[in-house]
Image (spheres, rainbow, N blue to C red):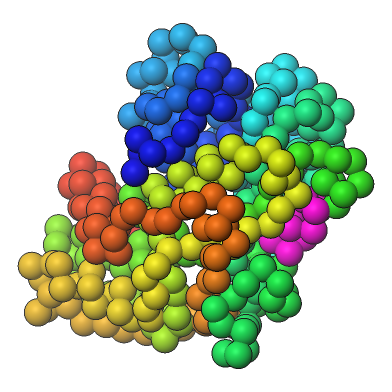
């Protein structure tokens, strides 16, 4: 629960969140603003959409120095140098990335550049201008890719077998983080977070596009057909709000720098089970049909994403608080509200 998380170590400290406008970054900013006295700096690009930060925009506009947006880009070293040199953060949550596996099949070069070289550029800037800060580098469970059944649940020592350019880029991110810890003594913590979702989840992810399509159907914007990819992939689901609690806990034990952790939820199911649950919550459920869209199928699928999280739970006494049903209801209601307020929302295909 929120009140059980000790955040005293963040009191009046400067916290930089790269990717603050994303799902995880915005929830992290929400939590830090409500539950700590830290000074929050969020890195955005000039074209970053700010809708995920709508609850914080009034506070940002007050210019009270609790919440600040700073412009930068992982592909521009000069901008990163300027941010780190100016802010001199005590803590960095590095969440910015090209984070969509499906997109990476169409844009492999930009994915590799942003995620591997971008992380390298950021850590170089930190090494030069704020070498004593604590850095959370967000890798991904996708690094494990195609895992044999004998290795499930997946622990931190499982071999990498990435199944997309995105996954390959996160292998690089993972190794870059380890290198900067071992070679330069940067205080880097690395996480491999398994599926985490909830309000503000991008519609390129399966459960979020299901919820979005249901909301569009309910508003009679599209026909009652949900387009899907592989429904047989197995996933363990966590709520994004539990994920950000884990990330804050991560940096609370400073002697754990250099450690790598798998983090994930308790509820495992097939993607098709997620779809069934979401459809069951719609008044249109008897009319909805399911259709496989070949464009939504990956050339290779990481289809056994079940984590062993014993190491992180032992070191931090963390466990998820939010049940699968609440996460999915909140996600569906997020899309319902969003589409009610904007009937021109496009169905990503």
Residue 177 counted in the magenta span: yes
| Image x and y of residue 172, in percent | 77, 60
Going by the image, does 271 lie left or right of 174? Answer: left
Q: Quadrant of the N terminus?
A: top left
Q: Quadrant of residue 13?
A: top right
Residue appearing at x 14%, y 58% in the figure: 219
Q: Nearer the viewer, residue 276 or 250?
A: 250
Q: Quadrant of the C terminus?
A: bottom left
| Image x and y of residue 174, in percent | 73, 58
Residue 142 counted in the magenta span: no
Against 197, residue 46 (above or below) is above
- Residue 237 at least partly seen: yes
Residue appearing at x 53%, y 71% in the figure: 307
Q: Nearer the viewer, residue 154 or 222?
A: 154
Q: Quadrant of residue 73?
A: top right
Against 135, residue 231 (above or below) is below
Going by the image, does 83 lie left or right of 209? Answer: right
Residue bounds of the magenta highlight: 169-178
Q: Quadrant of residue 80?
A: top right
Residue appearing at x 84%, y 46% in the figure: 180
Going by the image, does 333 lie left or right of 317? Answer: left
Q: What is the residue that sits farthest to the right in this orientation?
A: 183
**Which secondary structure type mostly characterizes the magenta part of the structure?**
helix
Going by the image, does 171 lie left or right of 335? Answer: right
Residue appearing at x 59%, y 37% in the figure: 252
Q: Nearer the viewer, residue 159 or 21?
A: 159
């Amino acid at each position: 629960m929120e009140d059980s998380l000790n955040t005293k170590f963040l009191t009046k400290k400067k916290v930089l969140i790269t990717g603050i406008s994303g799902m995880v970054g915005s929830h992290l900013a929400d939590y830090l603003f409500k539950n700590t006295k830290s000074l929050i700096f969020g890195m955005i690009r000039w074209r970053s959409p700010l809708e995920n930060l709508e609850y914080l925009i009034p506070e940002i506009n007050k210019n009270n120095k609790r919440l600040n947006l700073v412009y930068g880009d992982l592909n521009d070293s000069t901008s990163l140098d300027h941010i780190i040199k100016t802010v001199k953060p005590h803590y960095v949550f590095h969440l910015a990335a090209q984070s969509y596996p499906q997109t990476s099949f169409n844009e492999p070069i930009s994915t590799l550049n942003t995620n591997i070289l971008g992380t390298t550029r950021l850590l170089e800037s930190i090494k030069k201008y704020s070498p004593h800060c604590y850095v959370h580098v967000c890798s991904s469970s996708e690094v494990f890719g195609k895992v044999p059944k004998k290795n499930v649940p997946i622990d931190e020592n499982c071999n990498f077998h990435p199944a997309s350019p995105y996954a390959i880029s996160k292998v690089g991110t993972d190794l870059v983080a380890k290198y900067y810890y071992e070679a330069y003594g940067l205080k880097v913590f690395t996480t491999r977070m398994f599926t985490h979702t909830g309000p503000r989840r991008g519609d390129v992810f399966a459960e979020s596009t299901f919820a979005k399509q249901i909301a569009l159907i309910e508003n009679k914007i599209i026909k009652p057909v949900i387009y899907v990819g592989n429904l047989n992939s197995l996933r363990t689901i966590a709520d994004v709000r539990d994920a950000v609690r884990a990330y804050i806990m991560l940096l609370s034990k400073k002697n754990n720098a250099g450690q790598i952790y798998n983090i994930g939820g308790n509820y495992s199911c097939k993607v098709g089970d997620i779809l069934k649950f979401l459809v069951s919550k719609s008044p249109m459920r008897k009319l909805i049909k399911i259709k496989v869209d070949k464009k939504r199928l990956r050339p290779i699928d990481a289809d056994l994403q079940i984590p062993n999280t014993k190491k992180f739970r032992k070191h931090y006494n963390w466990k998820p608080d939010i049940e699968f049903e609440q996460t999915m209801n909140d996600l569906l209601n997020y899309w319902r509200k969003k589409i009610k307020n904007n009937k021109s929302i496009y169905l990503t295909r």
